[in-house]
């Protein structure tokens, strides 16, 4: 399998040699962000250069050639010349301008760039020119090591991927270029434990990554790369031995829908998992892993993180092709996620509780997805386009994919689900005799909704019958209530009386039996995670309710 990646890398490197130039990083990209909040223009150029750096570096490690070395050294020189290694979206601003400390801003991508150069230095030190080696070490010292040591960083306390990616990438730099066993190296390792522990606190003991599987491969990837290198370099396996780490390692297996897709909650974006990381989880953690097609392709990660690519080459084993897609029912009791995958019945279901203060939060407590293992009928749209406003808490839920309106949740007396710490309360979880029952009290997530005193949602699921019985129980303090149930799909719905029919390209169908004829559908066009226009359909079913009512929807897949 590894020969596939080596061959692919060699071909891509040859194309760069033929072109004979370093990918440009235009000044205009910085201005586009300052003036318009546009991230895409700059990042397209930035990642094109990171691709060139990673490919030439990997090619030199696998099959060194003088002409490759010459171009790689020029690329490294230009990376060392960059204004900053961080992305404009992460730079501090003063009166609409980038602050002076931007050059040494230590964000995700600055830390990743540092780790790339440090590991290239480690692997190719004997081949680089003395002048270039001196420049690389100077920039790593200024932009990464001294910058990290200079002050406390907010990301060290973040309980999400920021702490592990930046901390892990800084750790790779520390272990690659700081003298082994030196007081400075040991002191830096000691301090990095703060970031690693912050990352682990972001998980419950169930190991669920609430940000989605793409963030699992990102955050857990750098955590593992550092943890593994720490064990091998200094004989310190402190992180590898933790029970919680083993639980986190198993997350993708239970979140998997098929070989390419995973449960799409929160800021999920479809992405190929790093085969090296997945293999490590199987070999070292001894956990079940999802089936992958083989070693990850060269272009599997649009950011071209060298840490991923190098370990795909070094760590990928045949286990990624030998994993079995068996029936799996799993309940993450901390995250309150239930997943059911049954390849034999060609059926998939997942539902989530949780809170609305999760990292990369969507207003989606009580949301669910259902479909075949090939395609979801009712879905979650995952992450939208990352713009400046997307991460503005005042504006975040105005984006369709983030707000309650973009999820399968009701609007109750004109009120949708609200942001805040209030979460779901688990009323019941029963899994026996091929039947699943999962019930959540969602009352608190609707804040001060007029007249609402209780809202409980229950799913009864049968994989054998390929059915989901959804029951929403409402209690109000007055009569004359209006409830609009919403369901999200990428398939154009057909309304037939009190039923809605969804048909996949494969011919498989899903029927929603609703207890009302007041059904409409709305077509929504939004920007997906890559900034491309995407289409979704919202099925809206309206009900007029008394003080106590139960709305029952039967979902059947044929």
Image (spheres, grey):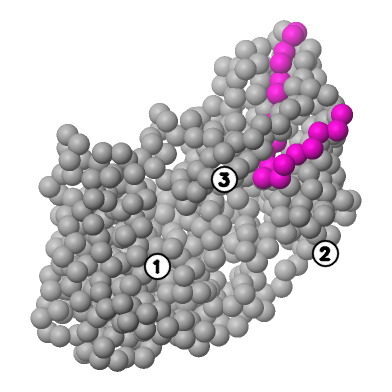
* Residue wearing tag 3: 534
Q: Which is nearer the N-term, disc 3 or disc 2? A: 2
- Residue 16 x, y percent position in the rendering: 33, 78
Asked where in the image residue 129 lies, by quadrant, the reply is bottom left
> Which callout, 2 or 1, points to the residue nearer the camera?
1
The correct choice, above or below, for 260 with respect to 470 in the image is below
Q: Say if residue 230 shows up in the picture.
A: no
Q: Which residue range is magenta in the image?
A: 479-497
> Which callout, 1 or 3, points to the residue nearer the camera?
3
Total number of numbered discs in the rendering: 3
- In the picture, measured across the screen, residue 12 lies left or right of residue 253, that is left
* Residue wearing tag 1: 304
Crowd band around label 1 with a 10 angstrom C-alpha radius: few (<14), some (14–19), many (20+): many
Q: Is residue 439 magenta?
A: no
* Residue at 40% in and 29% down: 394
Crowd band around label 3 with a 10 angstrom C-alpha radius: few (<14), some (14–19), many (20+): some
């Amino acid at each position: 399998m590894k020969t596939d990646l080596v061959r692919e890398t060699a071909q891509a490197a040859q194309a760069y040699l033929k072109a004979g130039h370093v990918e440009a990083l235009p000044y205009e990209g910085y201005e586009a962000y300052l003036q318009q909040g546009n991230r895409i223009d700059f990042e397209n150029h930035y990642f094109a250069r990171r691709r060139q750096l990673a490919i030439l570096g990997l090619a030199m490690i696998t099959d060194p050639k003088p002409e490759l070395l010459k171009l790689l050294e020029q690329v490294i020189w230009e990376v060392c010349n960059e204004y900053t290694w961080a992305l404009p979206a992460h730079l501090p601003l003063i009166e609409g301008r980038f602050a002076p400390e931007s050059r040494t801003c230590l964000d995700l991508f600055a830390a990743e760039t540092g780790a790339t150069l440090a590991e290239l230095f480690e692997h190719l030190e004997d081949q680089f020119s003395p002048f270039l080696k001196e420049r690389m070490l100077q920039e790593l010292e200024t932009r990464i090591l001294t910058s990290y040591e200079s002050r406390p960083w907010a990301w060290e306390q973040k309980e999400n991927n920021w702490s592990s990616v930046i901390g892990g990438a800084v750790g790779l730099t520390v272990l690659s270029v700081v003298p082994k066993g030196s007081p400075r190296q040991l002191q830096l390792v000691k301090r990095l434990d703060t970031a690693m522990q912050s990352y682990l606190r972001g998980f419950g003991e169930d190991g669920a990554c609430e940000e989605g599987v793409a963030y699992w491969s990102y955050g857990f990837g750098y955590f593992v790369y550092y943890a593994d290198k720490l064990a091998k370099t200094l004989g310190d396996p402190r992180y590898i031995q933790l029970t919680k780490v083993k639980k986190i390692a198993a997350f993708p297996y239970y979140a998997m829908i098929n070989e390419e897709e995973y449960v799409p909650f929160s800021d999920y974006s479809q992405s190929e998992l790093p085969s090296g990381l997945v293999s490590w989880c199987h070999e070292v953690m001894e956990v079940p892993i999802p089936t992958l097609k083989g070693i990850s392709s060269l272009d599997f990660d649009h950011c071209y993180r060298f840490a991923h690519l190098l370990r795909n080459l070094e760590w990928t084993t045949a286990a990624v092709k030998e994993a079995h897609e068996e029936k799996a029912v799993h309940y993450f009791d901390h995250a309150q996620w239930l997943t059911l995958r049954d390849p034999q019945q060609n059926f998939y279901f997942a539902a989530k509780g949780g809170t609305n203060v999760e990292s990369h939060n969507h207003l989606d407590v009580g949301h669910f997805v259902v479909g075949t293992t090939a395609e979801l009928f009712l879905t979650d749209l995952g992450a939208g386009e990352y713009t400046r406003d997307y991460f503005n808490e005042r504006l975040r839920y105005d984006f369709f994919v983030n707000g309650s309106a973009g999820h399968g949740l009701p609007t109750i007396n004109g009120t949708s689900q609200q942001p805040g710490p209030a979460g779901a309360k688990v009323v019941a979880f029963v899994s026996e005799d091929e039947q699943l029952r999962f019930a959540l009290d969602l009352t608190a997530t609707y804040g001060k909704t007029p007249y609402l005193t209780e809202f409980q949602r229950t799913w009864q699921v049968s994989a054998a019958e390929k059915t989901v019985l959804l029951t929403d129980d409402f209690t109000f303090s007055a009569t004359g209530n209006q409830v609009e149930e919403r369901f999200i799909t990428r398939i154009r719905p057909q309304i037939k009386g009190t039923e809605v029919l969804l048909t996949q390209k494969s011919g498989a169908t899903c029927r929603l039996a609703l207890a009302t004829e007041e059904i409409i559908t709305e077509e929504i066009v939004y920007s997906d995670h890559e900034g491309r226009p995407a289409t979704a359909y919202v099925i809206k079913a309206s009900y007029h309710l008394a003080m106590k009512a139960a709305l029952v929807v039967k979902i059947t897949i044929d």
